[in-house]
Image (spheres, rainbow, N blue to C red):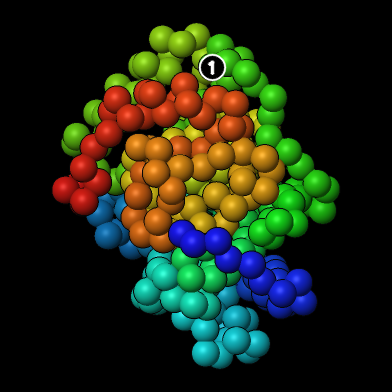
């Protein structure tokens, strides 16, 4: 991605709209969390519901009120060029499987990007009330307080978070093999939380030293990756390249652990386009 800067006034404006959109989507998600919703299955392990669809509509509606001509890339039906000049990247309900089972680890994720580069992002858990916000060059904030990544200098000091893509074959096996290698470095343990946007934010606030997943979509990582970077961490693909605004593997660390973690994820790379 090329280096991009925004006028401070415009950055403040898109940041405010991102927060308003996340709040609107969060109200829908919280309502369905209280009252219940029928889950429909793309596959037995890939669920969707009216909560996802209505939350996306609420976020999009909020954005369109201020920026009617901006492109939108979102999980439940809006498709746009990931390198569009003005692009909103939305996950209306990240962690749908958690949501379906009443596990309160899910979020609404909203990011504004300029030419493929995230410039502001919001990740909001409407049940716990956790707000994570970041803007390019403006830092990362959790519930309004400036935050930074942890200071772990070796994997033996780290808790590692990871995710599984829906693939139950080679990608799952590669993930398990990478976890075994992390354990070989005497990590404190692993956590599989089931919500990539929050996993990334938890790297940013220092709970995790490392997060990796072999395949994520832009709406899963756009806001969270910016949060990690603005908190002082580092995010690349699992092979060490800059993140594209396209499906990719993601490795996020506190920066100090990036090279040693990258040695492991590189060792277990998989062809993500060859998997579903």
Name the residue: 65% across, 87% down.
Answer: 66
Res 228 seen here: yes
Query: Is 193 displayed left or right of 24 in the figure?
Result: left
Q: Quadrant of residue 60?
A: bottom right
Relative to 130, say whether 254 is above or below: above
Residue sticking out furthest to the right: 145
Q: Nearer the viewer, residue 92 or 275?
A: 275
Query: Is 123 displayed left or right of 250 in the figure?
Result: right
Number of disc labels: 1
Q: Nearer the viewer, residue 214 or 83?
A: 83
Residue 166 x %, y %: 29, 46
Relative to 155, say whether 235 is above or below: below
Q: Residues within 10 Å of mark 1 (few under 14, many from 20)?
A: many
Residue 96 x %, y %: 45, 54
Residue sticking out furthest to the front: 3
Name the residue: 57% across, 57% down.
Answer: 223
Query: Is 247 displayed left or right of 186 in the figure?
Result: left
Name the residue: 36% across, 16% down.
Answer: 180
Relative to 118, say whether 155 is above or below: above
| SS class, disc 1 | helix
- Which residue is denoted by mark 1 in the rendering? 155
Q: Quadrant of residue 271?
A: top left
Query: Is 97 displayed left or right of 135 in the figure?
Result: left
Res 30 seen here: no
Residue 198 x %, y %: 58, 46
Name the residue: 38% across, 76% down.
Answer: 80
Residue 216 x %, y %: 38, 50
Relative to 118, say whether 152 is above or below: above
């Amino acid at each position: 991605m090329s280096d991009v800067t925004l006028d401070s006034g415009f950055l403040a404006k898109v940041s405010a709209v991102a927060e308003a959109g996340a709040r609107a989507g969060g109200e829908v998600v919280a309502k369905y969390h209280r009252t219940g919703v029928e889950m429909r299955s793309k596959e037995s392990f890939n669920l969707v519901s009216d909560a996802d669809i209505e939350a996306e509509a609420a976020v999009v509606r909020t954005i369109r009120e201020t920026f009617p001509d901006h492109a939108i890339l979102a999980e439940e039906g809006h498709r746009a060029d990931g390198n569009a000049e003005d692009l909103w990247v939305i996950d209306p309900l990240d962690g749908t499987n958690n949501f379906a089972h009443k596990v309160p680890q899910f979020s609404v994720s909203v990011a504004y990007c300029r030419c493929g580069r995230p410039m502001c992002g919001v990740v909001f858990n409407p049940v716990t009330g956790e707000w994570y916000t970041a803007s390019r060059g403006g830092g990362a904030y959790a519930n309004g307080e400036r935050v930074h990544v942890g200071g772990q200098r070796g994997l033996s000091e780290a808790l590692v978070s990871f995710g599984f893509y829906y693939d139950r074959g080679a990608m799952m096996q590669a993930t398990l093999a990478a976890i075994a290698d992390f354990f070989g470095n005497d990590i404190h343990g692993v956590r599989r939380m089931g919500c990539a946007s929050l996993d990334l934010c938890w790297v940013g606030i220092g709970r995790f030293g490392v997060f990796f997943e072999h395949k994520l979509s832009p709406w899963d990582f756009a806001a969270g990756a910016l949060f990690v970077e603005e908190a002082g961490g580092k995010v690349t693909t699992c092979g060490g390249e800059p993140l594209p605004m396209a499906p990719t593997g993601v490795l996020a660390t506190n920066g100090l652990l990036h090279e040693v973690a990258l040695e492991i994820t590189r060792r277990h790379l998989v062809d993500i386009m060859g998997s579903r």
